[in-house]
Amino acid sequence: MNTLFSEALWIAITAWVSAQILKVVGGLIREKRLDFSFFIRSGGMPSSHTAMVTSLATSIGVLVGFNSIEFAIATVFASIVMYDAAGVRYSVSKQSVILNKILQELRNRRPKGIQQDVRELIGHTPVQVFSGGILGISIALLWLWFSGSFNP
């Protein structure tokens, strides 16, 4: 396996895992209990999708070059993922809240009908996406600096 490919991939995985661990810690602080389901949930602070794609784009930029086609592809990919997280998926989250209110009203009238709510936390606020981006870029730069691949 190409060393640059391997390093960029491990950086992206590390950024995703780091963001998910931060969600578990955030849940522990908020709810005063350890809930490992936060590790596999989408949504929340910070955006793990954003952390992953920004770390990938950053590592490709440093390793291959910021003028490379690979960096351009990674940047476009990251932009789409970030737009989706803060735009489309966040809108779905807001719609889920409204849908759950409707479902609750229906359940109150016919208790045996609808049994399950729609998952509400799917997307991200712009702050969560921005935080994921900062996390991803930071992890990539720190990793590459400590590995000797990046000398600012």
Image (cartoon, rainbow, N blue to C red):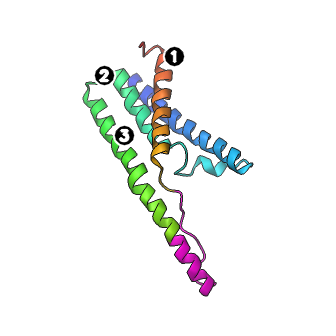
Name the residue tied to disc 1: 146
Name the residue tied to disc 3: 78
Name the element at disc 1: helix
Few, some or many C-alpha atoms within 10 Å of disc 1 (few <14, some 14-19, many ≥20)? Answer: few
Q: Residue at x 42, y 29 (%)?
A: 8
Q: Is residue 110 visible?
A: no
Q: Is residue 73 visible?
A: yes
Instruction: Give the left or right position of residue 62, taking residue 52 as reference.
Output: left
Q: Is label 3 in contact with label 1 (beta carbons under 8 Å)?
A: no
Q: Residue at x 41, y 35 (%)?
A: 54
Image height check: is 99 above or below 136?
below
The count of marks equals: 3
Name the element at disc 2: loop
Mark 2 is on which residue type? Gly
Q: Which mark, residue 65? A: 2
Q: Residue at x 50, y 33 (%)?
A: 135
For the record, the magenta segment spans: 99-121
Q: Which mark, residue 95? A: none
